[in-house]
């Protein structure tokens, strides 16, 4: 009997590489110009590949394509991250959500609404992770202008008002949180402003989801930056006051607690 032919397996991420995923990301952005959002399945799978590839890519190559990658990721994030298209429910429920459903007592597939929020969160999480790795492995200088632009956006009436989608607001809050956790030691200069913004979004005018995101940002402003900068005490005091004020609310929802 003939011996089986030998072979080797090469990961798609190693074979194609970082620049290919950046190009695909730009194609997604190009196909969703204006207010149209990108395809959720394409985004979800592509971002997974991008995050894995960043760890294996030479720093020089990361720097070469960093600006293009960053611009594409921000474009997707600040459009509110992509919602699932109606035709994709069955595919998404089977491929992604069935394993999650099997961990529940009833062993039922998740509802379309559950899938919707799960994918929104996953795409935002992957974008935040990818951007954190970009600044860690590539050029760190754009980090400061990115955090500054996020602060500027979150400080506007537009961002706080009803005219802005909550998913856009959550995207900005979660990205700022991720950057403070991964690069906080370099961000001590603007941390007081960030803490003030986080406290603002903890207020009664915000939804529970926004309040939870703001509390996570407040935590990141303390933990990520550390206590070695001159504004540390002021940030900690502001956080304590914000939490005490929240806990005094009689109708405060359990997830926020």
Image (tube, helix red, strand yellow):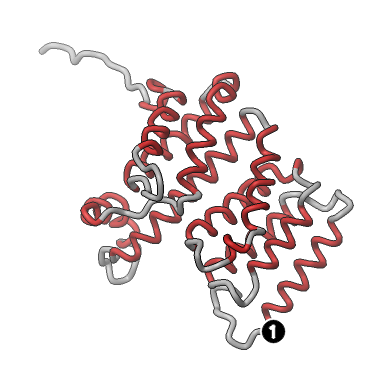
Of residue 246 and residue 223, the one placed in the foreground of this image is 246
Mark count: 1
Q: Which residue is mark 1?
A: 248
Q: Residue at x 53, y 54 (%)?
A: 171
Of residue 134 and residue 65, the one placed in the foreground of this image is 65
Q: Name the image quarter holding residue 20.
A: top left
Residue most extreme to the right: 230
Residue most extreme to the top: 2
Provide residue 42's location: percent of width, then percent of height: 33, 41
Say few, some or many: other residues with alpha carbon within 10 Å of mark 1 (under 14 / 14 to 19 / 20 or more).
few
Horizontal side, residue 125 vs residue 82: left or right: right
Q: Name the image quarter holding residue 48.
A: top left
Quadrant holding the C terminus:
bottom right
Q: Residue at x 62, y 29 (%)?
A: 137
The residue tagged with tag 1: helix, strand or loop?
loop
Quadrant holding the N terminus:
top left
Provide residue 9's location: percent of width, then percent of height: 33, 22
Q: Residue at x 73, y 60 (%)?
A: 195
Provide residue 40's location: percent of width, then percent of height: 34, 48
Residue most extreme to the bottom: 250
Horizontal side, residue 89 vs residue 207: left or right: left
Q: Name the image quarter holding residue 106.
A: bottom left
In the image, residue 185 sits, relative to residue 23, either above or below, namely below
Of residue 192 and residue 219, the one placed in the foreground of this image is 192
Horizontal side, residue 87 vs residue 58: left or right: left
Q: Residue at x 64, y 65 (%)?
A: 215
């Amino acid at each position: 009997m003939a011996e089986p032919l030998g072979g080797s397996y090469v990961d798609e991420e190693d074979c194609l590489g970082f620049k290919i995923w950046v190009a695909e990301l730009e194609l997604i952005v190009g196909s969703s110009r204006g207010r149209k959002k990108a395809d959720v399945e394409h985004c979800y799978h592509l971002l997974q590949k991008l995050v894995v590839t960043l760890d294996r890519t030479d720093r020089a190559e990361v720097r070469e394509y960093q600006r293009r990658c960053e611009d594409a990721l921000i474009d997707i994030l600040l459009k509110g991250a992509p919602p699932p298209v109606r035709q994709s429910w069955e595919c998404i429920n089977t491929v992604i959500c069935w394993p999650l459903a099997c961990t529940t007592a009833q062993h039922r597939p998740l509802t379309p609404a559950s899938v919707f929020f799960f994918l929104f969160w996953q795409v935002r999480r992957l974008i935040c992770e990818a951007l954190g790795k970009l600044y860690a492995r590539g050029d760190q200088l754009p980090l400061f202008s990115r955090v500054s632009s996020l602060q500027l956006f979150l400080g506007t009436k537009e961002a706080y008002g009803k005219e802005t989608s909550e998913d856009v607001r959550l995207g900005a809050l979660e990205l700022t949180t991720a950057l403070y956790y991964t690069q906080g030691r370099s961000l001590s200069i603007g941390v007081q402003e960030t803490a003030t913004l986080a406290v603002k979004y903890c207020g009664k005018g915000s939804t529970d989801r926004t309040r939870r995101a703001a509390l996570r940002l407040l935590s990141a402003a303390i933990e990520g930056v550390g206590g070695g900068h001159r504004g540390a005490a002021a940030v900690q005091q502001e956080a304590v006051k914000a939490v005490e004020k929240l806990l005094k609310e009689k109708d405060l929802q359990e997830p926020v607690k």
